[in-house]
Image (cartoon, coloured by chain):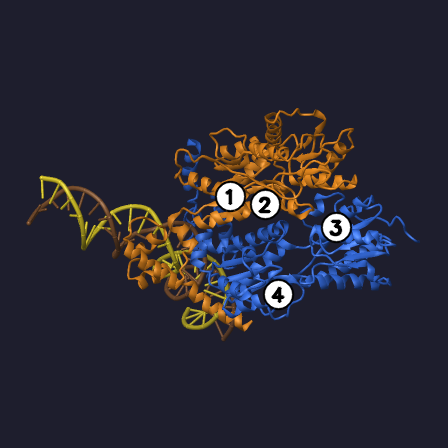
Chain colours: A orange, B blue, C brown, D yellow
Amino acid sequence: METLKKVAGILNQKQNVTIKQVALRAGVSQMTVSRVVNKQGLVKEATRAKVQAAIDELNYRPNLSARRLAGGKSLYLGLVYHNPSPGYLTKILVGGLSACRENGHHLVLENLGLRAPFSEPVKTAEYLAGTGLDGVIVTPPLSDIEKFVDTLEHLGTPVIRIAARNIETDKLHVSMDDKAAVTKIVSHIISKGHKDIAFIKGPETHPSTYHRYDGFIQAMKANGFKVNPDYIVGGDFTYKSGLDAAKLLLESPKPPTAIYACNDDMAAGAVTAAYMKGLTVPNDLSVAGFDDTEIATNIWPALTTIRQPISEMSACAVNLLAANILGETEADTQSAILDFELIERDSITLPNKSLK
Amino acid sequence: METLKKVAGILNQKQNVTIKQVALRAGVSQMTVSRVVNKQGLVKEATRAKVQAAIDELNYRPNLSARRLAGGKSLYLGLVYHNPSPGYLTKILVGGLSACRENGHHLVLENLGLRAPFSEPVKTAEYLAGTGLDGVIVTPPLSDIEKFVDTLEHLGTPVIRIAARNIETDKLHVSMDDKAAVTKIVSHIISKGHKDIAFIKGPETHPSTYHRYDGFIQAMKANGFKVNPDYIVGGDFTYKSGLDAAKLLLESPKPPTAIYACNDDMAAGAVTAAYMKGLTVPNDLSVAGFDDTEIATNIWPALTTIRQPISEMSACAVNLLAANILGETEADTQSAILDFELIERDSITLPNKSLK
DNA sequence: ATGATTCATGTTAGCGTTATCATATACTAA
DNA sequence: TTAGTATATGATAACGCTAACATGAATCAT
């Protein structure tokens, strides 16, 4: 304890490494240091090097509070979410946080899981607008409640949505091409020799469900396969729904050799359903998911899935929103569509009962 | 887009509700307003009411940055982690972040998953100390690498650990009583009528493993039950290890009627193992876990488990660490032990094959 | 060479808040 | 009453930074 206290004393001095001291050390004015730190291009290379050296020696870190106070460009951005999977939220947070820190903004977490955004979108939006946030990042599924987002904007709160690709292009958003992603992974399954591929859908209320379904259809058609309606079953993104859906599929007269589930949780449920039937994965049944969340690697076998660039999406949302609020927006930076990635793991192999 | 830009303009003005304006409106000085806002007891009731009215009318919200600048107490706190489960990390982040925001501190995320803290604890600590952080919050399992934590402290970086209860009382830490928690949940299983209860351990390297095991033993002994050595099997906190361990248990001549697994992932694996054996949970086998992470509610049946107050722990860690660094530490606020909670869900019921 | 034009840097004045000290008012005790 | 003490409020100066303007040096065209 004494150790810590003493240390604290040292630190407090150290904390005082201010722009003034750096300026003194480098033999320039504070403004020049500020310019170096902010990477403005009006400093001679020699000076910049001198200043940078002083910064490094003193281990100077700009004081965000002072910066905000002086520049007025440090924003309080709300990140609203509603019972997302922890894996998703973590990635959103990590990305958003680091983008915020780089730009001196603050991320304020708003958990709407305790409110009723679906049944009372206007009221919820009014609450949010009243918090004095400079802007709000809206994550799925909240980003699909039009009434909620619209109200927020009408009340004068800038909004950016993170969502599947389903948004009018003139509104701020960050998204990924769900359809193309599913097309890619289903094509991958097909390339392994599967023909009888079942599809477990997401909830009807979730727009991404449709995009993913379209992606599935596209992959099947592109390979000249017919889509067997019996192989299309409903789900709601929960493990249980995946388990039930897969049970149904595996009990049919001619069960599929592969199941594509619209997210990892349902895929995990499908794996369990296979076990319950005495089948093994991937030998008797191939399975794949979507999201690359925790459960994809925590079950056995690990799931082949689509990785969403979630951290990048939220970092991007922070930057876009901030630029927009501060009026720094370029003509075409209103939205961004990021790339996905196919993650190959151990849940897919050649079909066992291939009819070849 | 135009809308947003205009809005930004409005916002910037709106942001200007400053203490000065409130003071003017209330006919007092800024300091008096400040005192009202900060609830210092040196303001006459009449004045306070007047000021409060002005605050409400103008919808004044103090500017955190200015406050921090003036108060000069804003810290950069590192949060170091190493491949935690996303559910755990999310909760840590939410708690830590909100505590930071309240006090005007900054949380800097440091993912050590990419380094080698276990094999190179000193080097890793040196790296961290070199980042200029004012203090560091160390989460499990890093909090159990003595060499790492010690080095950090020797290098002058204040540290607080979040850990299971296994720390000398004179070092800063926040923890939960793992042993008592397991005693409670195992007693709960026993109270449902189970006698043949198996235990799936965590990895030997993880101190909480021992505490949880002790808790199990204590519950069994307290009820006068013998601990069958065949019912104690190893695991490593992964789903797969839980699955394998449970398989083993269920194949024994006299399988247990209940399995207690040291975390939720292993419990989930045990549930799957039961399915693979053609058993149903909870009718043929009761199962319980620890942590109350995502997977506990995402599988079916939902797991009865122990909820760790993770967010509270990290909030507490932030506050304790900050107080310590700023020298505001009271005599006995060096550490905190928080309460757990038993979460009853659907994975436990009366034993089917009771020998009664 | 001369003023015009760039480029590089410095100076000054806040940003909104709180600490600190100063002042004014009210209350006590003799 | 008179000083003396407590209580309530105000004035002023930071906190660390950047915007905006001011200055000085270097380059240029003519």
Neighbor class of circle 3 (other Cα within 10 Å; few <14, some 14-19, many 20+) is many
Type of amino acid under label 1:
Glu
Q: Could you tell me how far apart the alpha carbons at marks 4 and 3 are, in whole angstroms? A: 37 Å
Looking at the image, residue B102 sits to the left or right of residue B27; the answer is right
> Please, what is the three-letter code of the amino acid marked with disc 4?
Ser
Q: Is residue A231 visible?
A: yes
Mark 2 — on which chain does it sit? A
In front of the other: B316 or A164 = A164
Marks 4 and 3 in Cβ contact (< 8 Å): no
Q: Which mark is residue B243?
A: 3
Q: CA distance from mark 1 to mark 3?
A: 34 Å
Confirm whether circles 4 and 3 share one chain.
yes
Which residue is located at x 51 percent, y 66 percent?
B157
Please provide percent x and percent y for residue B52.
Answer: 50, 49
Identity, as a three-letter code, of the amino acid under mark 2: Leu
User: How far apart are labels 2 and 1 at the CA level?
Assistant: 13 Å
- Are the residues flagged by discs 1 and 3 in contact, CB closer than 8 Å? no
What is the chain letter for disc 4? B
At which x and y percent is residue A225?
A: 64, 25
Residue A89's tag is 2
Residue B335's label in the rendered image is 4
Return the chain for callout 1: A
Tags 4 and 2 touching, CB below 8 Å: no
Q: Are marks 2 and 3 on the same chain?
A: no
Q: Please check whether the numbered discs 1 and 3 fall on a single chain.
A: no
Of the pair B98 and B47, the residue shown nearer to us: B98
Counting residues from the start of the chain, the first of labels 4 and 3 encountered is: 3
Residue B205, located in which quarter of the rendered image?
A: bottom right
Q: Are marks 2 and 1 in contact (CB under 8 Å)?
A: no
